[in-house]
Amino acid sequence: MSLARFARWCYAFRWPVIVAWLLALAAGVLLLVIVDARFVPDTMSVRLPGTESQRALDVLEKRFPAEAGDTATIVFRAPGGVMASETRRRVERFLQEVAAIDHVAHIESPYTREANAISADERIARATVTFDARGNDLPANVGAAVMRAIAKSRAPGLEIAFASQIEQFSEGPESGSAAREAVALVVAAVVLLITFGTVVAAGLPLLTAALGSGIGTALISLLLTRVMALESVALQLAMMIGLGAGIDYALLIVSRYRQGLDAGCEPPDAIAEAIATAGRTSLVAGGTVIVSMAGVYLLGLQFLQSMALGVIVVVLLIMLVSVTFLPALLGVVGRGVNRLRLPFPGHRSAGASAYLRWSHVVQRRPLVAALIVLPVLIGMGLPVFSMRLGFGDAQTEGGSNGGVRAYELLAEGFGPGFNGPLLVVAQLDSPREADQIERLPERLASTPGIAFVGPVTFNARRDAAVIQVVPSTSPSDARTDELVHRLRSDVIPAVLAGDAPSVSVGGITAFNIDLSDLIARRLPVMIAIVAGASFLLLMVVFRSLLVPLKAVAMNILSVGAAYGALVAVFQWGWLNELVGVAETAPIPSFLPPILFAILFGLSMDYEVFLLSRIREKYLLSGNSRTAVSDGLAATGRVITGAAAIMVTIFLAFALIGGERPIKMAGVGLATAIFVDATLVRMVLVPAVMELLGDANWWLPGWVGRLLPGHIEHETKNRRSVRTSADERHTNSPESVQEQVKGRSEPEGVV
């Protein structure tokens, strides 16, 4: 069944289609209320085969099972001193209560002689709680139980702070998301009103995006959290992309529908035409997003795959809603789509005329335009060469107030390195190897960059040993990265020369360093494969070699600008206070691949929107120059409006509350979409296509024969209007239009 016929079916059964979707949304909301979704921190389920930190964890799990679970640090601060009798009694009573909580394996009291857990001025102490499993395997009530014990034990003169990823279990998704979504939707509504000029037309994309995003996020919360460890950031990313893409696709289809009405079509025919053209374009654009997100699976990391899967689920639902619910809704609205017109001055066609004039300006001096814009884009991307992947700490990443306070107290009392200790883990096969391990602490203590080295701890069978090493720098400091690499390559091998035991440097800090290194190695491969797959997809759709090659190159420029903005704002500190971030820190290693996949797909949306219309014009006229100018005139206003909505949504996530990674995603996405919809689509694309001329559509015959079928847009052989009711859906209204010169197209035509 063709898309046009499918659209007619949705029109004919519009009320059952609408009711079915609304029931699906109601069921999702109801289940969300009944069933509690379980989110886990981002790296808690990650395994890194072949890395030292993973080998260390494997040894701990097998030979130190009590040490293999996640840990939490509880920090005490007493101005009168933690050794005061009353304070000590309260702390010890509190520790006994925590030790009785299920899944707490043991607690290292600060009053144990070997603990080295009381600051020099005796005002700050720390206790380490070890659980019997990793965080994603613990019941959700464990963190809450610890927090209740803390709340009950706080008293005047005794401050208690708790730092652990376990705490996130009781917090759920970040609380500021509702405010961000509300602000984004309000501003999006304003932009839609300006773009369409009528209340009814502006409301349709909002309803479509809200429906698709609502059902999608419900599926993610209820289903994905049951089959894999899913971090709450994944839900927020999916919601962000769902709202933006949903409004974009619906904006495209509603614009085309209104154009059909203006050209004299009856509502059923206008709906069929809109879905056959704009709906097809939306499916191709959404497919590109899905292909890009599927590239994340090449990294082989489950927590990244869960984020990608969340976006894929939401985009799939947005695509489905756009070609089913929206045509049904248009069938109900009919010609009323233009009701409640706002008293904006000027004619709706003014926007198309302005973009036509702009296109002529660019096309008169295409080389000059390209030479002006290219250095700007390259300059915006230059900071990417200074990007440092890593993970922040409680202070730089934000998080709960308790976690930040615990970080501050640990740094004050013991130094910043105590927030991310290293574990030197040895697997022993003979007593002689145990003797070698016992020589390690002295050598480690004399290594620059190390603040504290604990004693060697053997397991009961003495076939494994662990040494705690505390750096003098924080987990997010580049010097900590250098220390880990130096310990592995120089310090430890120098002590254990010859037939030495297997020793690995692990711990959460080392684990994050290994994760960043692994992503940095695999990211170029992912970029190459995603870019190649997108190139092939566009080559099939547009039957051209140079058009998809140009599209891929320009998308990479947009992504480079986004990466540059991340480095400048969050790593260098430029305008960082504007987005509510006080501390600079490395870029979380999971963000560049996720952002690349999202941005590459979303940027390709606008490329597909623009090229689809240029291709239609070219097939009708055979003139590349007028096809470019008319295509830009037809799509310019919609691309600008859609981009404004996207940028608004992403900036809302960046500026209003939010965890640091979400702020980064918002800034990166907003930068890329703004650059893509202005410098790239409005200047660079028409300039390059003007320079290439008819070569834009060149495709060797042998390549064309290899492509699956002859996938063309519905306008390939349409040089006159088909008036048959059954065939009318295959005719674009622009086949009866003049080339925008004598009569400008209605606003928002795509």
Image: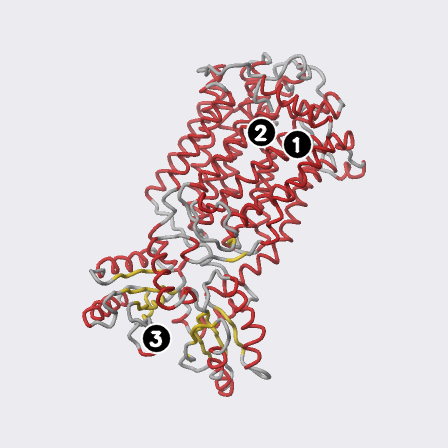
Task: Mark 3 or mark 1: name the one nearer the start of the chain.
Answer: 3
Tell me the amino acid under the disc marked 1. Answer: Val
Q: To which residue does mark 1 refer?
A: 683
Q: How many marks?
A: 3
Quadrant location, the N terminus = top right
Q: Check the image and tell me how it is coloured.
A: secondary structure
3 or 2: tag closer to the N-terminus: 3
The structure residue drawn at horizontal position 31% and vertical position 79%, both measured from the top left corner, is 113
Per the image, label 2 sits on a secondary structure element best described as: helix
> Do labels 3 and 2 touch, CB within 8 Å?
no
What residue is shown with label 3? 115
Image location of residue 28, percent across then percent down: 39, 38
Number of the label disc, if any, that sits on residue 339: none
Q: Earlier in the sequence, mark 1 or mark 2?
A: 2
**x then y, percent, for residue 92:** 24, 70
Which kind of residue does numbered mark 2 sit on? Answer: Ile
Residue 739 position in % (x across, y down): 69, 17
Tell me whether circle 3 and circle 1 mark residues in contact (CB < 8 Å).
no
Q: CA distance from mark 3 to mark 2?
A: 62 Å
Label 1 SS: helix
Mark 2 and mark 1 in contact (Cβ < 8 Å)? no
The vertical placement of 276 against 446, above or below, is: above
Left or right of 357, for residue 168: left
How far apart are labels 1 and 2 at the CA level? 13 Å
Residue 406, how many percent across, how many down?
34, 60
In the image, is residue 257 above or below residue 405? above
* Dot 3 amino acid type: Ala
Query: Which label lies toward us, 3 or 1?
Result: 1
Q: Which residue is mark 2?
A: 639
Above or below, comparing residue 730 to residue 378 in the picture: above
